[in-house]
Amino acid sequence: MNRLGVIAVAAGAAFALSVPLFLKPYGIYLSSTWAVLTIAAIGLNLTLGYAGQVSLAQGAFVGIGAYTTALLMHAGVPYPIAFIAAGLVCFAIGWLLGYPALRVQHHYLAFVTLAFTTLVFLVLRNEEWLTGGTYGLSSIPRPVLLGWSTNGSVRFYYFSLGVLTVLAAGTWWMLRSPWGRAFVALRENPIRALSLGLDTRRYTLMAFAIGSSIGGLSGAVFAPLVQYIEPLSFALNLSLNLLLMVIVGGSGYFFGPFIGALVAVLLPEWLRFIQGYYLVLYAVMVMVMMAVCPTGILGLMERIVKALSTKRSPTQPALQPEGTSP
Amino acid sequence: MASFIQLLVSGLATGAIYALIAVGFTLLWQTSQTINFAQGEFVMLPAFFILEAMYLGAPFWLAILIGIALSVLLIGLAFKLIIVDPMLKHGVLPLVISTIALSLFMKEMVKNLYSSNAQPFPALAPPIDLHFFGAVISTQSLVVLAVAISAVVALHLLLHKTRLGRSMQATAQNPTLARILGIPVRRMVLYTFLINAVLCAIASILISPIYLAKFINGETLGVAAFLAAIIGGFNQVRGAIFGGFILGILDNLSAAYLSSTYRGAFPLLILIAVIMWRPQGLLGRVEERTV
C-alpha cells in the first residue's frame, strides 16, 4: 500500500471509530449492520474476487452461521464457542459445496450455489423442531465477553467493528501469503495454474471453505445484533445483495466489500425521500456502473487517480493479475 | 391412477410453459453468451402490459397483440441495445450482475407503478372440467399445452426449415465462420432477442391466469427456466424443451406423492445431480474449454 492508500484507510478507521459520537442509536445500529455485511462480503470477495468462483450462496452461509450461533447460545453454550462453531460448520459445508466447483465453472457454478441457497432456505423454513420454522428464533442474547457486556448499541457496534478488524486483518495476511497468490492464479487461468504444479483442486475447495466460514462468522455477529432471525432474511435476496456489494465496491479489491456494503446500507437511508423507488434507482446505478466501469467503485477511483497522475497507480488493487506468475 | 393422469396433464401444462421460458433463455446464451437473470421478470411483465391495455379499453385479443408488441420492443429490442450491447465486451459476469439489477428494477417498477397485489388475469379458455376415464382435466391445461406446443413447433420450423433459422443456428454455433459466409451475425443475434421476447410474452399470457399477475412471479419462473435449461442442456433448444417438461411433471408429482413442503427442493437436487454427473445437461453437447 502506498501513502495515499494508508491515509485513506487511516481516515476510514478514524471515522468508523468516531461514528457513535455523532449518530443516534438507529445510525449506530445501521453501522453495526454495515460491519456485519462487510464481513460477509469480505468472505465472498475471497471466493469470487480473488479465486474467481462465482457463488450465490454467501447469504445462506450467513444464515447457517446465525442459526448455529443462536441455537448454541440457547443451549447455554458460551458465545465465543458458538462463534467458532459457526465458522467451523460453514467451513465444512463450504468445503463440500466446493466439490461442484471442481467440475463446473461460471454460470453452472452460479446455479449450483443458487440451488444450495434455496435448499438451505427450505430446510430453515421446514425443520420447525430445530429452527422454529417461519417463526424463526427470538430473544438471542447479546454476548458478554470477559465480563464486558456488549448490550447497548454503542458497545455492540464496537464489538462488531472489532470482529471486522480481526477478520479483515486475517484475510489481508492470508492474501499476502502464497495462498492468496494461488487463489489469484486460480481466477486468472486455472489450467495454467494446474500445469505450473499448483494443486488447484485443494485451493478451489479452500477458497470456498474459507469464504464460506467468514460468511458464517458474519452470521455469528448478525444473530446477536438483530436478536431475532427468521429464514426469509437469508433467502436468495441476501446472496444477490452480497454479490452486488462485492461487485459495486470492486471485486478483487481488498477494500471493495467495505465500500460496497457502505453503499448498500446507506443508499436506502439517503434515498428515503423517493420511498419505494430507491431500489429502482439502486438497480439503475448498478446497471450504469456495469456498463461504464465493471470493476466497481474502487476500479473507477483507480482509473481516475491513474488519469490524474502519470505516476504508478496509487490505489493499487490488493493483487494484480501479474500475481499469477510465481 | 385417475389422480396420476390429472397430475401428469397439469405437470405437462406447467412444463410446457417452463419450456417456452427456458428455450428463450438458451437462445440468448447460445447467440450472445447472455445469462439472463431477468428472464423470470421478462415473463412477469407482459401480463401487466396486457392488463394496462385492457384498462385503457382495448378488447382482450387486441390487448394481447399490444402486449406482445410492447414486449418485443422493450424486453427484446431495448434490452439488447441498452443493456446487453454495451456490456458484451466486459465478459459474462458483469452482464450477469447487470441482469440481476435489471430484474430488481423491473420488479420494483411494477410494484410501485402498479400494485403489490395480485391482479386477476383473463384466461384464454373458459375453465370447463373435462372427464377422461375418471380423471378431471381442465380445458385451461389443454389450451396451455396446445398454445405452448404450437409455439415450440413454430420455433422449431423457423430454426430448421427456413434460411433465416439456419443462419441463426450458424451464428449460434460459430459466429466467426458465419460472418465469413456472409451471414449478418449482428442482426441474427438481435432476432434471437426478439424471439425470446415473444416467447416470454406467450408464457406470460399462459401462466398469468393460473398464478395471477404479480410483481413477484418472476422469481420462481426465472429459477424454473434456469433449472430446465441446465437439466436439459444449456446449448440445445430441444434440451431446454425436454428440461421444461421434466421439471413441470416432477414438480407436480413430487408435491403430491413425496412432500409438499419440500416441493421446491426436488428440482434443485436433480439440478445438482445433473451438474455433478452430466454438466452439459441430459441432451447437451460438451463445451470445449480453452486454455
Image: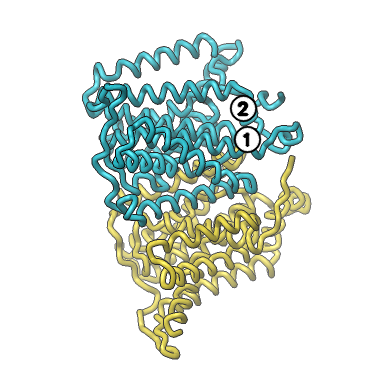
Chain colours: A cyan, B yellow
Percent position (x, y) of residue B76? 51, 54
- Helix, strand or loop for disc 2: helix
Left or right position of B171 against B52: right
Residue with the most extreme top position: A3
Q: Residue at x 75, y 31 (%)?
A: A196
Q: Quadrant of residue B102?
A: top left
Percent position (x, y) of residue B118? 30, 60
Q: Nearer the viewer, residue B264 or B223?
A: B264
- Helix, strand or loop for disc 1: helix
| Label 2 environment density (alpha carbons within 10 Å; few <14, some 14–19, many ≥20) | some
- Location of mark 2 (residue): A179
Going by the numbered disc 1, the residue's amino acid type is Tyr
Percent position (x, y) of residue A299? 53, 25
Position of the N terminus of chain A by quadrant: top right
**Is residue A293 in view?**
no
Q: Nearer the viewer, residue A129 or B134?
A: A129
Left or right position of B92 against B258: right
- Location of mark 1 (residue): A203
Q: Residue at x 27, y 26 (%)?
A: A150
Q: Chain of mark 1?
A: A
**Is residue B94 in view?**
yes
Q: Nearer the viewer, residue B210 or B170?
A: B210
Percent position (x, y) of residue A126? 36, 57
Q: Quadrant of residue B114?
A: bottom left
Q: Residue at x 37, y 51 (%)?
A: A124
B178 lies above or below A22:
below
| Label 1 environment density (alpha carbons within 10 Å; few <14, some 14–19, many ≥20) | some
